[in-house]
Amino acid sequence: MKELGGYRGRALGLITAAGASVGDKVRLRRDHEAIDGLLMPRTSGRDDTHLVLKLATGYNVGVAIGEGTRIEVVGAGAEPALSRPPRPASSESLPRVTIFSTGGTIASRVDYRTGAVESALTAEDLYSFVPELASEADITAKVLYSVFSENLTPQHWKHIAESVRDEIQSGVSGVVIAQGTDTLGYCAAALSFALQSSPAPVAFVAAQRSSDRPSSDAASNLIGAVSVAARAPFAGVVVAMHEWMSDETLLIHRGTKVRKCHTSRRDAFKSIGANPIARFHLAERKLEILESDLPTRGSTRLICKPDFDDRAALLKFHPAMNAGIIDWHVDNGYRGLILEGTGLGHVSTTCLPSIARAVEKGVFVGMTSQCLWGRVDMNVYSTGIDLQKIGVHPLEDMLPETALAKLMWVLGQTEDSAKVSEIMRANVAGEISPRRIEGVDNGNHE
Amino acid sequence: MATTSEYDSIGLKVGIEIHRQLDTERKLFCDCPTTMSETEPSVRFLRRLRPTQSELGQVDPAALFEFQKGRAIVYEADETTSCLVEMDEEPPKDLNPEAVEIALATSILTNSKPVEEIHVMRKIVIDGSNTTGFQRTCVVAVNGWITVDGKSIPIQQISLEEDAARKTGESGVTVSYRIDRLGIPLVEVSTGPVITSPEETERVAKAIGNILRDTGRVKRGLGTIRQDLNVSLRDGALIEIKGVQELDLLSKAISYEVSRQLELLRIRDELRSRGIKEAQLAGESADVSSLFARTKSKVVREALSSGGVALAVKLHGFHGLIGRELAPGLRLGTEMASRASFWGRVGGIFHTDELPAYGISEEEVLSVRRTLGCGESDAAVLVADSEDKASDALTAVVERARETLLGVPTETRMATADGTTRYMRPRPGASRMYPETDVPPVEVTQEVLARIKAKLPPPREAVMKELSTDYQLNKKLVDQLVESEYVCVFRRVCSESGVAPSYVATVLTENLKSLGRDGVPVDRLTPDHFESVFASIREGKVAKEAAPSLLSWLSKNTNSTVEDGIRELGLRMLSEDELRNTVDRVIGANHSLIEQRGEGAQGKIIGLVMSEVRGSADPATVANMVKARIAGRSRKK
C-alpha cells in the first residue's frame, strides 16, 4: 500500500502522479534543477505547496512545488531492517510480571529513514531496549490498545481492570500498566476502586520525555515499575514516576492520591494530601519504604468489581458559572455530579436552586475543593451549611479527579442512591486521609 | 613543512567547518540570554543518557560502552542563563527568527541557495553535551561558493544549530557540564574538501570569518568560534579534527596530521616487511602482578596495594615502533595510551620502548618480556589498575596495534593547544538524525529574503570609504578598524559621544590590542561599555586619556558602571581649585628653577604637573594654568 504521509492537495497530486510512496528515493525537477532525496512524511495540517525531502546528508528540507514541478521515483525505499540484540539471559526463577500497554510509547525506536517512531510492543522489544529488565523479572508484554491517554474512557478502565484480574489470578507477581501521562491519574484512581484488596502490586508507569530520545525517563520509570511489580512488599494500585529532574530516584504514589501537576517536567506526578508510598533508587535498584499503610503483598484475596457508569461529571465552579450547566447534566440523564468548589467547598448561591433540583431528581452531588490540598469543610460558612442542607455531600480531602472516578465506579455497583452516598463518603481505597499534618514543619505542603 | 607540490603528491584534501556563535537576544529555542554565566551554579541534576538504536538496530558502540560503564552526567545550571528548556524539562520554543535571519544573511553573502522550508532535526549526540541526547540542527542553505585568492571554494552547507553544554569536569564515571552555553545559536559554514594545503586552509577560514563578521551579528572572542577539519591523504584516512580554536593553529594542525599519517604508513610498511600478520596480535594478556612485588614504580605500587593488578600483553614485531614519533610529542605509544584511557579509563600505559623508566627496573622489564615470551623484535605493553579497567585498556591497545597493520585508522581527533591532535572517539557512522517534531518548520519566502538583502551590511570597500571620508580617519586607522571587530561600535560611539573619531578609532584599535596583549579580557566589553566610557569623556567626567584604564577596569568588572570605575580608579576630573593647588605646590617646590629660567621653565613644570594629574585633568587646562601662575609670580615680583 502506498504510504502518503500527511500530504494533501497539490503535493498529494504530484506524489500520486509519480506513484511515489513515503520513504522512496525521488528526483524532483523544476526550473532547470533537480533535487534528489527520500520522500518524507509531512506534518498534517501544513500547506500543500512543499514536499519534505531527506537529503544525502541526512537533513530534511522543505522544497517548494510550483506549476512546472515534477517528481519521479528513482529508487524504492529501503525497508528498515531492525535486528534486535539477543534477549539477555533471564532466569526462570525471576518473578513473573505482565506489562500491559495502552498507548503512549514507553519503549520505542525511531525509524531514522522516515523519522517515524515505532513502539516496542513485545517483551523481546522491551528487553532489547531496556536490558536491565532481564534481571528484574520474567516479563510478558501485552498490548491492550494503542491510543493517546486522553482517548481512554471508563469502558477502557473496565477492560484494563479485567485484564489485570486475569493476570493476578494466573499467579503473576505483579502487573505494570504503561499509559500516556495525561489521564493516568484518573485511570490509577479508577483501578484502585475496581481492583479491591489486590494481593499483588499494580504499578502504573509513563514517561514525560518520549522514549525515542536518549534522555527519556521512560526506561528508568519502567525499571522502577517492574521492580515494584516484581518484589515490592506491598500490594495495591500505585504510580511510579520520577521524583525530581535527576535520574536518581522515583516516587511510588498511591493510586487514589496522585495527580499530574506539571505539563512537561519529569516530576509532574505528585502525591497530594498523602505521602508517597516508597522511593525507588535507580542506581542501586532498591526500594525504600516511606509509608507502611498499604496492604502486605499476598495477604488478601482479589475482589474485582470492574463496572463503571459514565453518567457522572466533574464541574469546576468559577465566578461566572451559569447554573444551567447543572440543569443540562440532570436533564441529560446524569446520575451524579462532583463539584470542584472554592476553598472549603463552596459555590455561588445562584447555583443552589439547580443543585437542589438535581438532588431531588436523585442525582448524587459531592463536593471537592479546587485548592487540591486540604479538606473541604462545609460547616464553617453559611454557604457550606446551605449546600449540605440541600443534599450536597462533602468529600473530605478526596482529589476531584479521584472523586469522579470513584463516583463512576460506585454508580456502576449500585442503583440505590442511599448506598451511593454511603460508599462515596466511606474510605474505600485510601482516597480519604483521616488525619494530616502536612506542611507544619517547613511551611511547604508538598 | 612540506611544499605545495609535496602536498599535491600525497593527495592532501581538506574541508573545513566553521562554527560561530550568533549575537542574538535570546537562545535558539528559548528565551534565555546568550551570555555565559559568571555565578556559581544554583542547581545540579544527574542524568543518564541511553543509547538509541539506529535504523539498522545498531547502537553506537562508543555510546553503548559509556552507558554500560554506568556513565552519569551531572548538569550544573543557574537561573539567569538557563530555563526548563535547556534542562530538557520543557519542549523547545520556535526557531529564533533573529538567528534564522543571520544565517540567511550568511547564505546570501556566500552565494548559497536558501532552502524553501527549514526543518529542524535531532542529531544524536550522547556524550552528555546535550541534555536531550541530541543536538538540534537545521540546514538553512546549500550549494554556495566564495572566491579566495582567485580560487572558487564550494560552500556545501550553511546550517544553524544549538551550541552544546560546556564540560566542567570528569571524575570516575561522572562527567559534569555547565548548561549556560547550551542553546546559544551557532551558524555553521562548511566547505567542500577542495583545499590542498595548510596555508590555503587558513586563508579560506579567514575569508569565511570575515564574511561572518561582516554580518555584524556574530559573537567575538575566545570560545565563540570553533573550527573542525576534515583531513584526508590519498593512502591515509579521512580524519575529523574537532575544536581548533585559533585561526593560526589551523595550518599547524594540518601539517602535523599529514606528518602523523605519513609516519603511520611507514610503520605499517615496516611491520609488513617484518612479516607481522594480524593473527599474531591475538592479545592474550598475562597477570604479571607478582613480578612487581617490590617495584619502585609508584603507579604500579599504588595499583597493587589498592587491590588492582598489573597486566601485560605482547605486541608481536612492534619493538622500536611504539616509541616512534608521529608528530611533536606524539608517539604511537601516545595513540595506544589514548585508546586505553578511552576504553579502559586508565591513567596511562607503559611500553618496553620507553622502559626501564618511571621506577620500573631493567630486571622487571626482562621478567615481563620473559613471562610473555617476547623475542627481540617484540614489544610489551603494561597497565596497572583495577582488573577490569586494565583488561579493557589492554584490549584497546591490541586493537590499536592491529589497526597499525592496516595503516591509518579512521577516527575523530581533538585538537590540542599546540596544534597536535589526540584520539577522541571512533568516527561515528552517518549521522543519525530524525525530525524535531516539537519545532514547526519555517518557510523562507522571497519576501523574507528580499528584506534581509536590503538590510545586508555594505561591502568592505564601502565601509573603508565611509571611514576615510565621513570620519576623516587616516589609512592606517581605517585598515586597523576594518580588521578589528569594532566598526559598528565605532559608528555608534562617534554619533552619540561627540568625541573625536580619530581618538575613538585609536582606542578601539591600538589601545585595545595592547590591553589584550597584556591579558586584559577586552572581549567581554559590550557596545554599551564603550558608549558609556566615551559619554563620560564628552560630559567632562574624566579626561580622554582615562579611556584605556577605564575599559580595562570594566572588562574585569562587566556588571559595574563606568561611574564605579571612575570612583574605584580615582579617575574623576580635578576641580579648578584642586588643580590650582597642585600647580602651586609644584611651582613652589621648583621655585629656584623658575627664578633661574623664568618662562623657560614652563615646559618642565607642565610635565611635572601632568605626571601627577594625567587622566584627571585636561592637558590644555593644565598648560594654561601653569603659564598663568608663572606669569602671575613674575608680575608680583
Image: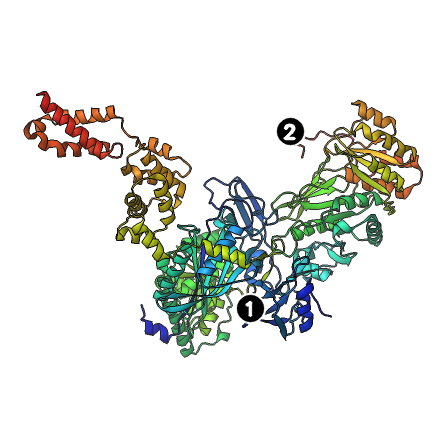
Where residue B613 appears, as percent x and y from the top left, is: 23, 32
- Residue most extreme to the right: A416
Do pointers 2 and 1 mark residues of a single chain?
Answer: yes
Left or right side of B501 for A445: right
Few, some or many residues within 10 Å of mark 2 (<14, 14–19, 20+): few
The residue that mark 2 highlights is: A443
Position of the C terminus of chain B, as image quadrant, is top left
Residue B181 visible (yes or no): yes
Mark 1 or mark 2, which is nearer the start of the sequence? 1
Chain of the residue that carries numbered disc 1 in the rendered image: A
Few, some or many residues within 10 Å of mark 1 (<14, 14–19, 20+): few
Where residue B348 appears, as percent x and y from the top left, is: 44, 58
Between A265 and A277, which is closer to the camera in this rendering? A265
Left or right side of A385 for B342: left
Query: With respect to residue B461, does B635 lie above or below?
Result: above
Judging from the image, the colouring scheme is rainbow
Between A132 and B556, which is closer to the camera in this rendering? B556
Residue B555 visible (yes or no): no
Task: Kindly identify which numbered label has been placed on residue B225.
Answer: none
Query: With respect to residue A145, does B12 lie above or below?
Result: below
Position of the N terminus of chain B, as image quadrant, is bottom left
x 73%, y 70%: residue? A1
Where residue A68 appears, as percent x and y from the top left, is: 60, 70
The residue that mark 1 highlights is: A56
Of tags 2 and 1, the one toward the viewer is 1
Amino acid of disc 2: Gly
Q: Secondary structure at mark 1?
A: loop
Query: With respect to residue B95, does B533 lie above or below?
Result: above
Where residue A329 appears, as percent x and y from the top left, is: 86, 40
Amino acid of disc 1: Ala
